[in-house]
Amino acid sequence: MLLFTSHHIVCDGWSTNVLLDELSRIYNEKAVGKKDELPKVVHFSEYAGREATRKSSVEGADVEKYWLAQFTDIPAPLDLPLDRPRPMVKGYAGATYRTKIDAEAYRKIKQLGSKRGCTLFVTLLAGFNALLHRLSNQQDIVVGIPAAGQSLIEDGNLVGHCVNFLPLRARFSEDLAFSSLLGQMKKTLLDAYEHQTYTYGTLVRKLGVPRDPSRLPLMEVQFNLERIGGSSEFAGLNAEVDPNPKSAVNFDLFFNIVESDQGLKIDCDYNTDLFDESTIARWLNHYETMLLGAVSGSRKASGRFTDDDAGGTFFAAGGLESCAEDVCRDRDDSSDVRTTSCTNARCDRAYDGRGKNDVSRVE
């Protein structure tokens, strides 16, 4: 076993794949007595210089204009159902819960997007947004995605922390079809990647987002899809790359999905001050159920559902219609629960002014 540990300030996901690829190349060449020539190394100082030049250019001004236009109004913070009251000061204690989507389901989900001209990333991201919408009953959702700055480098390999977090907004309406959500997310994602050189910190400062010591500004959940060590093969060895679980996290919730021929592996990093493992496990089950519901022909991604929807209600395959009941059941033992009779329509939550969560209306 080889354990690789690095601080995020000097290494990101892209860099990890670069290191694994070069390690396998060196190993394979030494195994046959040859010497491999690795790609040109780009120094981080070169990258930083390029970014500084870009920021002060006309291109940099256009990028800033784009992002400020996306947030002329600041959406309300994401209000997911919590297992415990949110601390007044944000904590970073965390854990990772893992589950898998098997190869057959993975193939169907991938085909779902490809029929609409969407990548797997877009399809899974749309599903993630739909899940957050259902859990929070909010119409305006912001999800952060990492964009690797190395993808813009054409003349060599760079190891370092070059990630910009891009806040993507998804807007829901009562009759939003899942196909429309796919189209919305496809355009949003492509536009964001066209303007990926703007930093999250700069955007927050420029927008003047009000600071809350209990939350991150603007976005509190993150999503990513990757292949870890997909091209790393070691001669004569059966090698598997597996990320370590987290014990500290920045975001409240982070879906990191690893794609392979065997299916999808979902590592969900979550803040243990807010969520229990059982809650995360249930939400991940909801996520797969929802995606497979879309595969079966359900049209809607939000709002109320009727019996004449193709394939039945969007959440029908496996019980996502019970999401509201789950939220209420989680709080049956809490003194903050005011109403516990639930249907599958909606579950609105509010704060009682003391920083505690309670179910304020169920209809």
Image (spheres, rainbow, N blue to C red):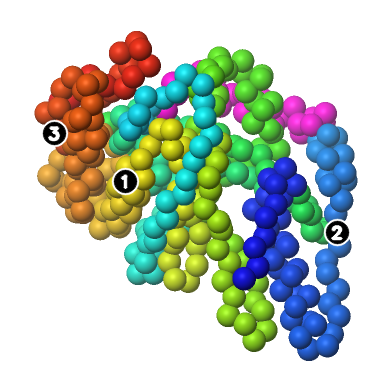
Secondary element under disc 2, as helix, strand or loop, is loop
Q: Which residue is mark 3?
A: 343
Q: Residue at x 35, y 29 (%)?
A: 84
Residue 213, position as x, y percentages in the image: 54, 19
The amino acid type of the residue labelled 3 equals Thr
| In the displayed structure image, the side of residue 246 where residue 305 appears, left or right | left
> Where, quadrant-wise, is the N terminus in this rendering?
bottom right
Q: Which residues are magenta?
A: 55-78
The label nearer to you, 1 versus 3, is 1
- As drawn, the label of residue 278 is 1
Dividing the picture into quadrants, the one containing residue 26 is bottom right
243 relative to 33, above or below: above
Dividing the picture into quadrants, the one containing residue 296 is bottom left
Count of numbered marks: 3
Going from N to C along the chain, the mark reached first, 1 or 2, is 2
239 relative to 56, above or below: below
Secondary element under disc 3, as helix, strand or loop, is loop
* The one of 265 and 186 positioned closer to us in this rendering: 265
| Local crowd size for mark 1, using a 10 Å CA cut-off: few (<14), some (14–19), many (≥20) | few
The amino acid type of the residue labelled 2 equals Val
Cα distance, mark 3 to mark 2? 59 Å
Query: Is residue 115 located in the magenta-colored stretch of the structure?
Result: no
| Local crowd size for mark 2, using a 10 Å CA cut-off: few (<14), some (14–19), many (≥20) | few
Query: Is residue 60 located in the magenta-colored stretch of the structure?
Result: yes
Asked whether the residues under the numbered discs 1 and 3 touch, taking CB atoms below 8 Å apart as contact, a structural biologist would say no
Q: Which residue is mark 2?
A: 41
Cα distance, mark 1 to mark 3? 21 Å
Residue 189, position as x, y percentages in the image: 54, 43
Secondary element under disc 1, as helix, strand or loop, is helix
